[in-house]
Amino acid sequence: MGSVRRGGSNSFLLFLGLNVIVSLVTVLAVLTYWERRRPPAPTAQPTETVDAAARLASAVPTSTETLVPTPTPHVYKIKPNDTLFGIALELGVSLTELMEANGLTETSVLDVGQILVVPTPGGPAPTGTAEPPPSTSPTAPPAPSLPSVAIVGVTGVGDLATEAVQLINSGGTAAMAGWMLDDASGNVCILPAFTLHKGAVSINTRAGTDTVIELHCGFDRAWWRSGSTITLRDATGSIQSTFTIP
């Protein structure tokens, strides 16, 4: 009998192995191709850190302290022959408030150059006029002006404790000895010897101690009535002023 030939089985195995190798190479080639075609993964960007507290603080406005201006007080410098009543009339303020603002009383003595605090605006405004240069030639002293005393009001009408006639001198110095106040009812008050400089004085109906700003007639009852006319006469009896009480 002849021998059996096994060459066909070896050829099949060789072909199968070669086919496997070709398949592996093909798969690897496809994978490599697709790996190259895939887009690169995006790179993560760092996230900005926001300081919220700092931004909020910068947005809040910084408070600025507001300075309140200090009001400038009104003052008055005492001149020769000034009286408290005359200053109050000139500045348009209450005599009582003027005394309280400066700790004064009706008997207080005023010194020339003394500074008074004015409780309400109304001090004399500066004129702003420049002083003329000193003259080299002597000038004659001005002639003294005549007194000009007038009744400017009556307070406390009908009340003995407060009833008073207010006089003011807007002219030269007046020697008031022998001057008098009277009315149609026969009431007469003869003023004592005193000198009224440019300024004011109060003539009280009641008794009391005379001062530089207050004199007293020394009566025990009120005189003046609404509608009465008061007459001021000088030592010769000449009428200097009249005033009708409202």
Image (cartoon, grey):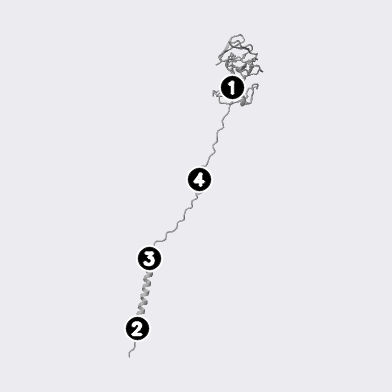
Q: Residues within 10 Å of mark 1 (few under 14, many from 20)?
A: many
Q: Amino acid at mark 2?
A: Gly
Q: CA distance from mark 4 to mark 3?
A: 54 Å
Q: Residue at x 59, y 22 (%)?
A: 88
Q: Which residue is mark 1?
A: 88
- Give the mark, 3 or 2, whose residue is nearer the N terminus: 2
Q: CA distance from mark 3 to mark 1?
A: 111 Å
Q: Splitting the image into 4 quarters, where does residue 149 fall?
A: top right
Q: Residue at x 35, y 82 (%)?
A: 9
Secondary structure at badge 2 equals: helix
Q: Which residue is mark 4?
A: 58
Which dot marks residue 34? 3
- Give the mark, 3 or 1, whose residue is nearer the N terminus: 3
Q: CA distance from mark 1 to mark 2?
A: 151 Å
Q: Residues within 10 Å of mark 3 (few under 14, many from 20)?
A: few
Which dot marks residue 39? none
Q: Amino acid at mark 1?
A: Ala
Q: CA distance from mark 4 to mark 2?
A: 94 Å
- Give the mark, 1 or 4, whose residue is nearer the N terminus: 4
Q: Look at discs 3 and 1 and give the one toward the viewer.
A: 1
Circles 3 and 1: CB atoms closer than 8 Å: no
Where is residue 162? Give x, y as percent: 61, 19
Q: Amino acid at mark 4?
A: Ser
**Vertical placement of residue 235 versus 34, above or below:** above
**Vertical placement of residue 37 versus 240, above or below:** below
- Give the mark, 1 or 2, whose residue is nearer the N terminus: 2
Q: Nearer the viewer, residue 136 or 176?
A: 176
Q: Which residue is mark 2?
A: 7
Q: Nearer the viewer, residue 139 or 160?
A: 160
Q: Indicate left or right for 123 with 46 as reference.
A: right
